[in-house]
Amino acid sequence: MLRSAKPKTARGKRAQERRQPQVIENVKRAMVLRGATTSETVNTALQDLYALKKPDAVYFSKKNEILPFEDDTKLEFLTQRNDTSLFLLGTHSKKRPHNLVMGRMFDFHILDMLELGIEYAIPAYVFDSVKCAVGSRPLFLFQGDVFDQREDYSKFKSLLIDFFHGEEIHGIDLKGIQHLISVTAGPFPDDGQPGLIFFRVFALQFKKSGTRTPRVELQEMGPAFDFRIRRTRFADHSIWKEATRVPKELQLKKTKNVSRDGLGDTYGRIHLGDQKLDDIQTRKMKALKRIRREKMMGNMIDDSTVVGLD
């Protein structure tokens, strides 16, 4: 770990304050680096994923002796030095060929990480299509119930969304959405091993439809990967609870009889007293006037009166 010395200048003090926990955190930056041995498939995959993450990423082309599942001190040192909370490491060995390790940090310690094996890969330069602009936001499409049923798949989904999240915004122009990332869970084989996960990237094309809403077409722009989950390391419940704690300044104050759903819609509950139906104002019609109705009832009683004979 880096030594946290007392700053001697105002500039150093401001830089140290930026690294402290904030109520509204900055954009999560990612560190993309190579391991001691890599293959051409791994190198191309790192470059393509780095291109999708830019400009909120830093890429190290030199080799690094890092084995995160055996010793994570060097990786934690590099993430703290470069002020990155996400990392993507590429390695290659006979036991685990074409390997990617994706993870995130909390307080400059590894929170959770997941190892992916590349079973099939097509680099982005092979596809003859329009490429997305630097810094554009992707749409995500997860297909398969297993992403909500298995812990390793749900963590992989969470890591992907966190990796490409970007800056927090409240609105976006339709033309600003330029690409879509589709993640599909394949069937599980009979040997009990995790199935393949199909990672595809498509460019969005807006065509004329004759209405205000354009017709959307997808064109694959790459890269394309078939992943298989290998080793995992997840944080325990207490550390995960501390890492996902919402600051008091951002917590919504509870209001009586007001609730919100998962989509942010607000619902209110109104309590009414006893309703007197006779006093409720209804539609003003002559037939419904009380005076006229009572007068008609009085006339009916007078007409039905029987006069006795002498």
Image (spheres, grey):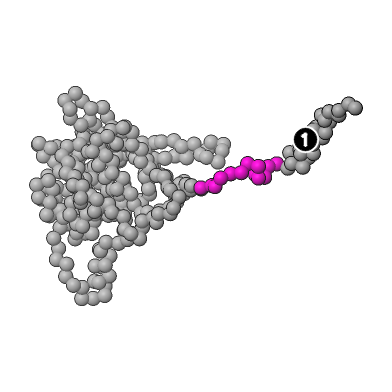
Q: Is residue 258 above or below residue 125?
A: below
Where are the magenta residues, as a range?
271-283
Can see residue 285?
no
- Tell me: 181 left or right of 102: right
Position in image of residue 156 (x %, y %): 25, 41
Asked if residue 49 is among those painted magenta in the image, a careful observer would answer no
Kindly indicate the quadrant of the structure image that contains residue 43: top left
User: What is the quadrant of residue 109 in the picture?
Assistant: bottom left
Decide which of 22, 285 is in the foreground and name it: 285
Task: Residue at 15% x, 39% y: name it.
Answer: 231
* Residue 270, image x, y percentages: 51, 48
Q: Residue furthest right?
A: 310
Our reading of the magenta stretch's main secondary structure is loop
The residue sitting at 31% across, 32% down in the picture is 145
Q: Position of residue 98 (x, y in %)?
A: 17, 38
275 part of magenta stretch: yes
Furthest-top residue in view? 190
Q: Which quadrant: the C terminus?
A: top right
Task: Please report the residue visible at 27 percent of the width from the left and 61 percent of the height from the top.
Answer: 21
Q: Looking at numbered disc 1 in the image, what kind of residue is underneath it?
A: Met
In the picture, the quarter occupied by the N terminus is bottom left
**Residue corresponding to mark 1:** 297
Asked if 92 appears above or below 254 in the picture, the reply is above
Is label 1 in a helix, a strand or a loop?
helix
User: Does the image show residue 85?
Assistant: yes
Q: Nearer the viewer, residue 59 or 157?
A: 157
Q: Nearer the viewer, residue 11 or 93?
A: 11
Q: Neighbour class for label 1 at 10 Å: few (<14), some, many (≥20)?
A: few
Position above or below: 305 against 8: above
The answer to whether 174 appears left or right of 6 in the picture is right
